[in-house]
Image (cartoon, rainbow, N blue to C red):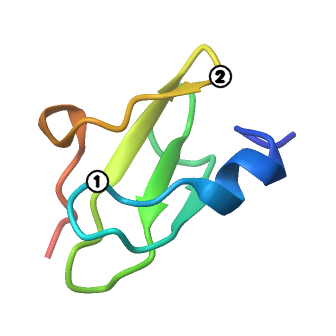
């Protein structure tokens, strides 16, 4: 089951770098939207079906 509607995912972008986001249902409790840019890679939580696109709430990628 998708985290967010496909039409919404098509228009959402990473607030930090403006790259597209992709779904990752394995991360976090409700899944995450992960920045597709390898240099950024922030993972934003999805809570109760609502993406939280705040940099302060994002998980930094482990390097």
- Disc 1, disc 2: CB below 8 Å? no
Q: Nearer the viewer, residue 21 or 60?
A: 21
Q: Nearer the viewer, residue 44 or 25?
A: 44
Relative to 28, is 12 above or below?
below
Q: Which residue is mark 2?
A: 49
- The residue lying at 72 percent from left, 39 percent from top is 4
33 relative position to 3: left or right: left
Mark 2 neighbour density, 10 Å: few (under 14) some (14–19) many (20 or more): few
Nearer to us: label 1 or label 2: 1
Mark 2 secondary-structure assignment: loop
* Res 30 label: none
- The residue lying at 20 percent from left, 60 percent from top is 16
Q: Position of residue 53 (x, y in %)?
A: 35, 38
Q: Position of residue 14 (x, y in %)?
A: 36, 59
Q: Residue furthest right?
A: 1
Relative to 15, is 35 above or below?
below
Q: Position of residue 18 (x, y in %)?
A: 34, 68
Locate the C terminus by quadrant. Answer: bottom left
Q: Which residue is mark 1?
A: 15
Q: Position of residue 35 (x, y in %)?
A: 40, 66
Locate the N terminus by quadrant. Answer: top right
Q: Residue furthest bottom?
A: 38
- Distance from disc 1 to disc 2, alpha carbons, whole Å, reads 18 Å
- Of the numbered discs 1 and 2, the one sitting upstream in the chain is 1
- The residue lying at 71 percent from left, 46 percent from top is 8
Q: Nearer the viewer, residue 11 or 47?
A: 11
Mark 1 secondary-structure assignment: loop
45 relative position to 2: left or right: left
- The residue lying at 20 percent from left, 85 percent from top is 39
- Figure quadrant of residue 36: bottom left
Q: Residue furthest front?
A: 11
């Amino acid at each position: 089951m998708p985290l967010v509607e496909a039409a919404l995912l098509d228009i959402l972008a990473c607030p930090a770098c403006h790259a597209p986001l992709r779904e990752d249902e394995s991360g976090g409790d409700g899944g995450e939207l992960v920045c597709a840019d390898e240099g950024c890679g922030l993972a934003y939580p999805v809570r109760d079906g609502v993406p939280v696109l705040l940099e302060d709430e994002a998980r930094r990628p482990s390097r």
